[in-house]
Image (cartoon, rainbow, N blue to C red):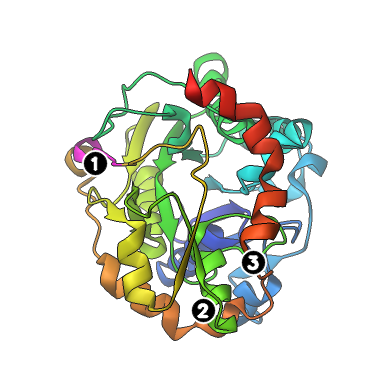
Amino acid sequence: MTSQPIAIVTGGAGFIGSHMVDLLLRRGYRVRVIDNLVGGREQNLAQHLGNPDFSFAPSDILDYKPGNPLFDGVDFVFHFAGIGDIVPSIEQPADYMSTNVQGTVHILECARRARVRKFVYAASSSCYGLAATPTREDHPIAPQYPYALSKFQGEQAVFHWQQVYRLPVNSVRIFNAFGTRSRTSGAYGAVFGVFLKQKLAGRPFTVVGDGTQSRDFLYVTDIAEAFLLAAETDKSGEVWNVGAGNPQPVNKLVELLGGPVVYIPKRPGEPDCTFADISKITRDLGWKPKVSFEDGVARVVAEIDYWRDAPLWDPASIAQATAGWFHALAAKGQS
C-alpha cells in the first residue's frame, strides 16, 4: 500500500457514505466520491471542499465502465450507492434491480480492471427476512420484498467476482443504521426520518403496530469503523453482521424523542425483532459498537434542523404510500 492510500466511496454524499468519507479523511486517505445526489446531499460533503485529498463530481454508478480514470491507483472501494428506501421497492422493482444489482456490477468491473486491494460491499440484513434472533451470518436467506432481494443479489455478484476474477471482497450486512444525515428523500422510509420531521412539526409520531417491535439500531459512525476494518484486514471473502447486538423497541425511541403517538397498522413481511449476532465481526476484526442508543439519539436531536425540509407523514399519507405493500404482502404474511 502507498503511504497515502486512495479510496472510492460510492454513495459518498449519502447517509452512511458521507460518514465513511469523514473517517477515511481523518485516517489520512485520499477520497474520491461517486454519488448522483438522488438520495445524497452535497451539504453532507461541504466540510471537505477545498481539501486536496477529497474530490467529488456528481455521477451515477450505472455510467461507469472499466478503465474509468477515477479508479486509477485506487486501493479500496466502499460501495454504498443504491436505492435505499424499502417501501417503494414494491412499486418499482425494476429500478431497484437495475441500480442495486447492475450498478454494483458496473463498479465491480471498474474495481477489477483497476486491481483494487479490496472491495467492501454495504449489504442489508433484510436478506434474512423474518429471521430467528439473534441472527448469525449463516442464517437462511429469505428476502421478503424487492429491496431485500436486490441488495442480496448485489452481494452475490460481489462474491462471484471474487470467485471468478479473484477480486478481493468483503461484505458487511447492516442492521438498523441511524444517525445524523439519514435520508430526507420524498419516499416513506426509515423511522428516524419520519419521526424527526413529525417532531419538528409538532405532529404525533406514527408508530407502526403497537410499538413493541424492536430494531437493532446502530449509530452510523460505528458502521463506518466496521467498514474500514473490513477493508484493511487481510481477510477476504467474508460476510459480517454489524448491529448493536442490543435491540431497542420503537416505543423507547418515542420515549427519548418525546411527543404524542398515533398507531398505524403493522406491515406484513416485516420482523417483530431484528437482532444481530455480532460475535463474528468482534472475533475476526476486533470491532465493537461504541455509541449507545441513548447517546446516538441525543446526537441526532441536536441536529434535528437537518430534517426540516423532509416530507411530513401522517396516517393518511402513509396508508397511501404503503397500499401496494399491503396488497402484495398481506396474504403472504397471513399464510
State left or right for residue 279 relative to residue 79: left
For label 3, the crowd category at 10 Å Cα-Cα, with few meaning under 14, some 14 to 19 and many 20 or more, is: many
Q: Which mark is residue 184?
A: 3
Viewer-nearest of labels 3 and 1? 3
> Where, by quadrant of the figure, is residue 311 drawn?
bottom right
Residue 100 appearing in the image: no
Q: Amino acid type of disc 1?
A: Ile
For label 1, the crowd category at 10 Å Cα-Cα, with few meaning under 14, some 14 to 19 and many 20 or more, is: many
Q: Which mark is residue 199?
A: 2
Element assignment for label 1 = loop
| Circle 2/circle 1 CB separation < 8 Å | no
User: Which comes before the other along the chain, label 2 or label 1?
Assistant: 2
Q: Tell me the distance, in whole angstroms, between the alpha carbons under discs 3 and 1.
A: 29 Å
Q: Which residue is drawn at 78% across and 40% down?
A: 62
For the magenta stretch, what is the residue range?
A: 275-281
Q: Depth check: 158 or 30 in front?
A: 158
Q: Residue at x 77, y 30 (%)?
A: 94
Q: Amino acid type of disc 2?
A: Lys
Q: Which residue is drawn at 33% across and 41% down?
A: 273
From the viewer's perspective, is residue 29 above or below residue 153? below
Q: Tell me the distance, in whole angstroms, between the alpha carbons under discs 2 and 1.
A: 32 Å
Element assignment for label 2 = helix
Question: Residue pushed farthest right?
Answer: 63
Residue 101 appearing in the image: yes
Q: Which residue is drawn at 65% across and 55% down?
A: 318
Q: Residue 278 carries which label?
A: 1
From the viewer's perspective, is residue 79 above or below residue 6? above
* Residue 18 within the segment the image draws in magenta: no
Q: Depth check: 214 or 184 in front?
A: 214
Q: Amino acid type of disc 3?
A: Thr
User: Which comes before the other along the chain, label 3 or label 2?
Assistant: 3
